[in-house]
Structure formats: structure tokens, C-alpha cells
Amino acid sequence: MEEFGFGARWRGWIKECLVSTRVRRSEYATQRARSLGLLRGVVVGHDEVKLSHLQFAEDAISFCEANMEEIMAVKRILRCFELVSGLKITFHESFMCGISVSENEVEEFASRLHCRCQKLPLTYLGLPLGASPRLKKTWKPVLDKCKARLAS
């Protein structure tokens, strides 16, 4: 984030969101599934950060290997979340996107989760996913939106 010009204060806010107790408490089911070997997630970046999901308010992204066992593990985790929280997952409003996975596989996985298929690049919570992060045009809509909100 520093390379993109985000200041220390902004980076601190983001870091706090990622490590705060409130956010970490909701990760128990995913951590348990990882410790049991049911969900591997993905490894990201030079520091090899293990990532299984990102969550912001009622929106979440789950990351898993492209195999039916992990897809079904994600589905079971979401069902457990429904039972524990009393909330309902809207699978029909959700979508699945594959990276280096055939369209047929993505369609099969999506049908098991009763969700739609989506291709990269896409926008999630106003942020670009799957587009080149090194290109300024990738971040232009984000910066324009921030400038507009700060101007008001």
C-alpha cells in the first residue's frame, strides 16, 4: 500500500481492521477447518501469507483449492455460520470465480454451491480484483471515488 502512496495513518487503519479482535473472533470456523486439513486456502505474495477468506461487514470472499472437497468444505463452513449466527447466506446472490481453472469446473463448483459464475477482472466492494495492480488505470476509479467523497 505504501508503494501506491497510501500514508502511514491509512495503512494503520487498514492493519487494525485486519487484526482487530472483533474480526478475528469470526474466523474460528475457518481456522478449525484449516487445522483439520479440510481447507487449504491460498498462499499469497513474497511473504507467503496463508489466506482463506476476506470479510467486510456482510460481504466475504473465500479462497480455496479448485477441487470438490474444498468447495464442499466452504459450503459446510457457510452452513455452520448460518446455524450459529441465525443469519442466512444468499447463495443465489453469490458468485464463484476460478483462477487457472476451466470454465466447466467453475460451473460445476458453482452449481454445487447454488451460485453464479463470474470471470476476472471484477469489482469487489469497489476494489478491482484480477486486474493488474501495477497499472494506474486499475486504481483510477478507486482514487476518483475517494477524491469525490473527500471533496464533499
Image: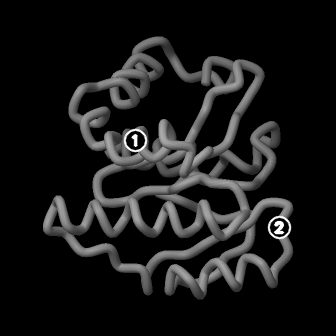
Q: Which residue is mark 2?
A: 101
Q: Are marks 2 and 1 in contact (CB under 8 Å)?
A: no
Q: Check the image and report above or below for 93 versus 86.
A: below
Element under disc 1: helix
Q: Quadrant of residue 84?
A: bottom left
CA separation, marks 2 and 1?
Answer: 26 Å
Circle 2 SS class: loop
The quadrant of the rendering that contains the N terminus is: top right
Placement of 20 over or under 61, stated as above or below:
above
Query: Which percent across, then down, holds residue 64?
Result: 63, 54
Q: Which residue is mark 1?
A: 32
What amino acid is at disc 1?
A: Arg
Q: Is residue 105 left or right of residue 69?
A: right
What crowding class fits label 2: few (fewer than 14 Cα within 10 Å), some (14-19), or many (20 or more)?
Answer: few
Amino acid type shown at disc 2:
Val
Against 70, is 36 above or below?
above
